[in-house]
Amino acid sequence: MELFVDGKIDAFLGTPPEPQQLRGRQIGHVIMNSNVDRPWSQYFCCMLTGNRDFVRKHPVATKRVMRAILKATDFCVRNPEGAARRMVDGGFTDRYDYALQTLKDVPFNRWRDYDPEDTVRFYALRLREAGMIKLTPNRILADGADGRFLNELRREMKG
């Protein structure tokens, strides 16, 4: 995610392909990029969530979905050109150059390193400070976080 400013747009939070389009049209300038600017760059930008009842009733299916997503993530790291081509061929975007730039910019390989609980805690604190939520980060983690599938897949998918 990038925060752009210019004379017409006070602030614009952009997710792909918007940042590439704005840069291509030379609109504004980046004042914050969560992929590289601390502290944002030290946490996951995206998280996978699941319905609590479904996850409890279908742990094998839940783990299979997570494994498929993480394998696709690893493919994006190993072969961004091939992943960008598949995005275009699949009709998800019509701009190969934007897709490739996004795949090269987003730190997909960090899923093995970052701590999802730290990420939830960090963003929950920001949301609480902004008055957007009332729950504490610890309450959110206690009520809804379960890292066992990710931990199992990290061990299984070393590399």
Image (tube, helix red, strand yellow):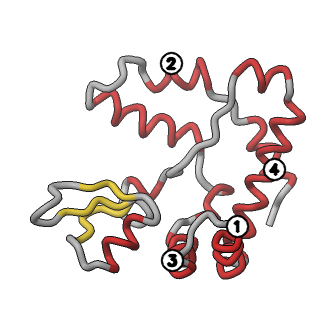
Badge 3 marks a residue whose secondary structure is helix
Q: Residue at x 74, y 53 (%)?
A: 69
Quick check: 85 left or right of 142? right
Q: Is residue 24 above or below residue 135?
A: below
Identify the residue at horizontal 75%, vertical 18% (top origin).
53
Image height check: is 104 above or below 47? below
Q: State which tag comes first along the sequence, 1 or 2.
A: 1
**Residue 76: percent from left, percent from top:** 68, 70
Residue pushed farthest right? 60
Query: Tag count in the figure?
Result: 4
**Residue type highlighted by circle 2:** Arg
Q: Tell which circle, 4 or 2, labels the residue nearer the N-terminal end.
A: 4
Q: Which mark is residue 139?
A: 2
User: Hey, what amino acid is under mark 4?
Assistant: Arg
Front residue of 77/88: it is: 88
Quarter of the rendering containing residue 131: top left
Q: Earlier in the sequence, mark 3 or mark 2?
A: 3
How far apart in space, not on screen, are marks 4 and 1 (Cα)?
21 Å
Please report contact status of discs 3 and 1: CB closer than 8 Å, yes or no. no
CB of mark 4 within 8 Å of CB of mark 3? no
Q: Residues within 10 Å of mark 4 (few under 14, many from 20)?
A: some
Using a 10 Å C-alpha cutoff, classify the residue at mark 3 as few (fewer than 14 neighbours), some (14 to 19) or many (20 or more): some
Which SS class for mark 4?
Answer: helix
x then y, percent, for residue 134: 36, 17
- The residue where tag 1 is placed is 90
Percent x, y for residue 45? 50, 51
- Residue 101 disc label: 3
Q: Are marks 1 and 2 in contact (CB under 8 Å)?
A: no
Q: Assess disc 2: are there few (<14), some (14-19) or many (≥20) residues with their C-alpha within 10 Å of its C-alpha.
A: few
Mark 4 vs mark 2: in front: 4
Is 70 situated left or right of 124 in this image?
A: right
